[in-house]
Image: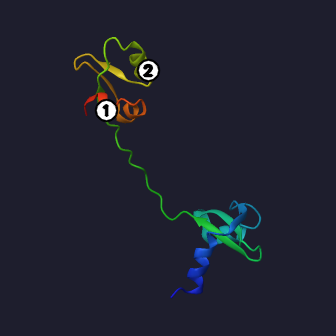
Amino acid sequence: MKTANQSMKNEITNFRVAKKISPVQPGAVKLARRYGEQLVCVRHRIDPTGTTRVTTVELVVDQAPINAKPEQIVGVRIGYREGQLQALVRAAGATWDKQAGVWRMPLKVARRLQLRERITEK
């Protein structure tokens, strides 16, 4: 059975944001004192009927560095006589690997240029 509070939480998603206030603006200073540095903003939301206003706060609850995954570099075969395609991949940052006889580029570049079928090594 849902409590009144749970029911209100589900309904708030249907409320429209009437005003967004930064922590230093009038109307948010009291909440800024209460929540401190974690306060991002205060929002006043109005229900679809226009009869109820709800004040919400956005808080920072966690912060962590993002560990970026290294780009996967692949070898792509492009024919000797395909000068236009070679110019295109060069412009996209690909480099020629003379020893292997392939163009080296990130997998996402090969996909974007629709060269997946030409990938010879991962």
Name which residue type carries label 2: Leu
SS at mark 2 in the image: helix
Q: Which residue is mark 2?
A: 88
Q: Are marks 1 and 2 in contact (CB under 8 Å)?
A: no
Q: Is residue 84 left or right of residue 6?
A: left
Disc 1, SS = strand
x then y, percent, for residue 34: 64, 72
Residue 76 vs residue 25, the one in the foreground: 76
| Left/right of residue 59 with respect to residue 110 in the rendered view | right
Instruction: Tell me which numbered mark, 1 or 2, is placed earlier along the sequence.
Output: 1
Q: Quadrant of residue 91?
A: top left
Q: Which residue does the numbered mark 1 point to in the structure image?
A: 73
Q: Which residue is located at x 67 percent, y 65 percent?
A: 42
Please name the residue shown 75% across and 74% down the image.
Answer: 49
* Residue 70 placement (x, y as % from top left): 34, 40
Q: Is residue 55 above or below residue 73?
A: below
- Residue 109 image-quadrant placement: top left
Residue density around tag 1, few if under 14, some if 14–19, many if 20 or more, within 10 Å: some
**Mark sitting on residue 84:** none
Q: Nearer the viewer, residue 118 or 2?
A: 118
Lateral position of residue 57 relative to residue 92, left or right: right
**Who's the residue at 69% across and 59% down the image?**
22
Can you give x and y, in whole percent of width and height, for residue 48 in the image? 72, 71
Mark 2: few/some/many CA within 10 Å (<14, 14-19, 20+): few
Between 30 and 16, the one lying in front of the other is 16
Q: Which residue shows up at 44% across the image and 25% down it?
A: 92
The residue mark sitting in front, 1 or 2, is 2
> Disc 1 marks which amino acid?
Ile
